[in-house]
Image (tube, rainbow, N blue to C red):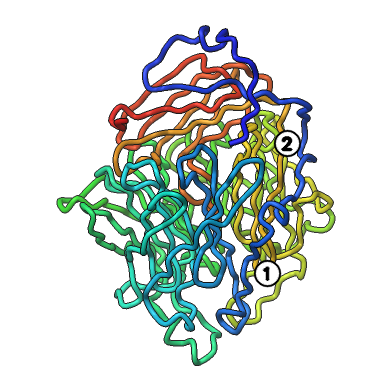
């Protein structure tokens, strides 16, 4: 990783008391940093000159949303973030980060061995990286048409043959566009949540057998001592179709609940986790209609943040219009309030238009202490059906303001492409504390929007969990920076595109922060006077060496 290191005289380190379980590196200097969101420069074509997301018509013979799945993580334990890019062909490509925005393809991911390749069922729709065996090397996880799988990390940027969690012959096999990862039943292992869109309509007769899988549903695949048990969930709304989901602890009671916003204007569902039954599986009840989530939406991606400062997570979800944001009322309920924070398309070219959002991320790109937001946009082609949409699907970048509202920076910004995009990931690729932005769309190279270092300070936090949840998925981190409190939840996906499990918080002019961590198993730790502009590593007491 290309760190820019300032001379560390030890003053900042010595000013903070020694605290067990935490360590940090030297200060990262920034020469020539600036403010605002005008720094992005697209260097994707030069950083990855040989990669292009495949055209879906090459696989299916008809237009289809390619999703451009991407997973981001340190696959070779060398300290920087690598990429796994899901070309809509058969084999995702592993691109190793060699520093200074130089990427080299080192391998392809072994094909999922299910059905004949020409049927197109092997193409991945979503990908993520998370360590499930505790060796410090993240495994690759993915879903597709009738399958869900994980690939073991063999080191040096290679992955072994897929372990199928669901295969097309399974009674629940369906069209899995997205998934989530986390320990739902609290046994220490990573479980997989599956969002099934259900049977597709409008496809050609020759593809009917391939795509007519089980109806839409949400299921949890539990890792029970190395074997998988897949359990479907009942929705209070009856029949439903789901394209997105997220494991999240909405009530901060220590277990993961499940949010699935619905697709094709089906009713959203939110399952409350009430602990385990006698078989060690989570007791999950959909009470979304009771708490304010009984809404029709076409949700494709989501992220969470404490937007109203009440200490509980709020959720923003992309739609075929502006995003919808559900705010906690502090008493277990939610209300929709995206307009109150002006999180909608406001530029002359996009206002009042049906722009279909896909992934969604809160990220402080300018490190001023207020989160910004980004949404890639692409028409929801439905495999042969005619769907009316405005022709230009602008990607939207919102700048976070000091009063908690957001400002659409407009279609003149470099990231406001009109090409159809689906996956996105904010990630600091060069270690300077400023988040780059990756954006993918079919039939074009990956967009890599380089972000130069900032005047504003920042902290980045790596959590090292124990054993089979080394990535600490489901952990909660609270960073207190002056009079601002930043709350983050470690998750694996936010739509078709993964950001790393590393927690990033912009700090503005704050020099030290206090950090509190609640681990997935309930263990808690607090650290004070942690200096800014450093990568911080916090290790669970049971993580071992």
Image coords of residue 45 (percent x, y): 72, 56
Mark 1 secondary-structure assignment? loop
Residue sitting nearer the eye, 545 or 157: 157
Q: Residue furthest bottom?
A: 205
Residue at (42%, 42%) from the top-left corner?
250
- In terms of image quadrants, where is residue 4? top right
> Which residue does the numbered mark 1 point to in the structure image?
443
Residue sitting nearer the eye, 487 or 157: 157
Q: What label sits on residue 452 in the rendered view? A: 2
Q: Is residue 332 above or below residue 279?
A: above
Disc 2 to disc 1, C-alpha distance: 28 Å
The answer to whether residue 495 is seen in the rendering is: no
Residue sitting nearer the eye, 498 or 361: 498
Verify CB contact (< 8 Å) between mark 2 and mark 1. no
* Position of residue 90 in the picture relative to residue 254 (left or right): right
Residue at (27%, 42%) from the top-left corner?
188
Q: Which comes sooner in the sequence, label 2 or label 1?
A: 1
- For the N terminus, the quadrant is top right
Residue at (57%, 48%) from the top-left corner?
316
Mark 2 secondary-structure assignment? loop
Image coords of residue 413 (percent x, y): 80, 49
- For the C terminus, the quadrant is top left
Residue at (54%, 85%) from the top-left corner?
203
């Amino acid at each position: 990783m290309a760190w820019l290191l300032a001379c560390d005289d030890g003053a900042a380190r010595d000013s903070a008391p020694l605290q067990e379980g935490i360590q940090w590196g030297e200060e990262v200097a920034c020469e020539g940093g600036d403010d605002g969101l005008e720094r992005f420069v697209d260097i994707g074509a030069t950083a990855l000159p040989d990669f292009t997301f495949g055209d879906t018509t090459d696989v299916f013979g008809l237009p289809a949303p390619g999703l451009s799945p991407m997973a981001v993580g340190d696959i070779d334990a060398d300290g920087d973030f690598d990429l796994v890019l899901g070309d809509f062909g058969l084999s995702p490509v592993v691109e190793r980060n060699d520093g200074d925005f130089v990427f080299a393809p080192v391998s392809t991911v072994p094909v999922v061995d299910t059905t004949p390749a020409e049927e197109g069922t092997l193409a991945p729709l979503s990908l993520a990286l998370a360590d499930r065996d505790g060796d410090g090397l993240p495994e690759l996880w993915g879903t597709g048409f009738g399958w869900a799988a994980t690939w073991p990390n063999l080191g040096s940027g290679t992955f072994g043959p897929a372990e199928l969690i669901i295969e097309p012959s399974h009674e629940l096999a369906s069209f899995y566009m997205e998934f989530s990862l986390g320990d739902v039943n609290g046994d220490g292992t990573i479980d997989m949540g599956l969002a099934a869109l259900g049977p597709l309509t409008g496809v050609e007769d020759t593809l009917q057998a391939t795509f007519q899988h089980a109806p839409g549903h949400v299921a949890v695949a539990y890792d029970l001592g190395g074997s998988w048990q897949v359990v479907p969930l009942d929705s209070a709304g009856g029949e439903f179709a789901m394209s997105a989901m997220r494991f999240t602890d909405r009530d901060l009671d220590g277990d993961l609940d499940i949010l699935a916003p619905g697709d094709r204007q089906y009713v959203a569902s939110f399952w409350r986790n009430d602990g385990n039954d006698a078989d060690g599986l989570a007791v999950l009840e959909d009470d979304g209609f009771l708490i304010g989530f009984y809404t029709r939406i076409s949700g494709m991606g989501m992220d969470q943040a404490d937007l109203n400062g009440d200490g509980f997570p709020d959720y923003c979800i992309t739609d075929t219009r502006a995003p919808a944001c559900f705010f906690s009322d502090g008493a277990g309920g939610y209300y929709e309030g995206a307009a109150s924070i002006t999180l909608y398309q406001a530029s002359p070219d996009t206002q009042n238009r049906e722009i279909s959002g896909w992934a969604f991320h809160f990220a402080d790109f300018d490190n001023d202490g207020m989160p910004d937001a980004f949404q890639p946009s692409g028409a929801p082609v439905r495999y042969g059906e005619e769907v009316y949409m405005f022709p230009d699907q602008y990607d939207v970048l919102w700048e976070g303001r000091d009063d908690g509202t957001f400002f659409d920076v407009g279609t003149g910004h470099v990231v406001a492409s009109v090409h159809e995009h689906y996956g996105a990931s904010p990630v600091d690729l060069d270690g300077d504390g400023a988040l780059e932005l990756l954006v993918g769309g079919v039939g074009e190279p990956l967009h890599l929007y380089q972000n130069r270092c900032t005047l504003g300070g920042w902290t980045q936090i790596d959590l090292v969990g124990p054993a089979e949840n080394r990535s600490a998925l489901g952990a909660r981190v609270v960073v207190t920076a002056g009079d601002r409190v930043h709350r983050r939840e470690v998750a694996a996906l936010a739509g078709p595109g993964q950001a790393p499990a590393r927690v990033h918080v912009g700090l503005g002019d704050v020099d030290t922060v206090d950090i509190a961590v609640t681990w997935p198993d309930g263990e808690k730790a607090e650290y004070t006077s942690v200096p800014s502009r450093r990568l911080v590593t916090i290790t669970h007491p049971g993580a071992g060496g």
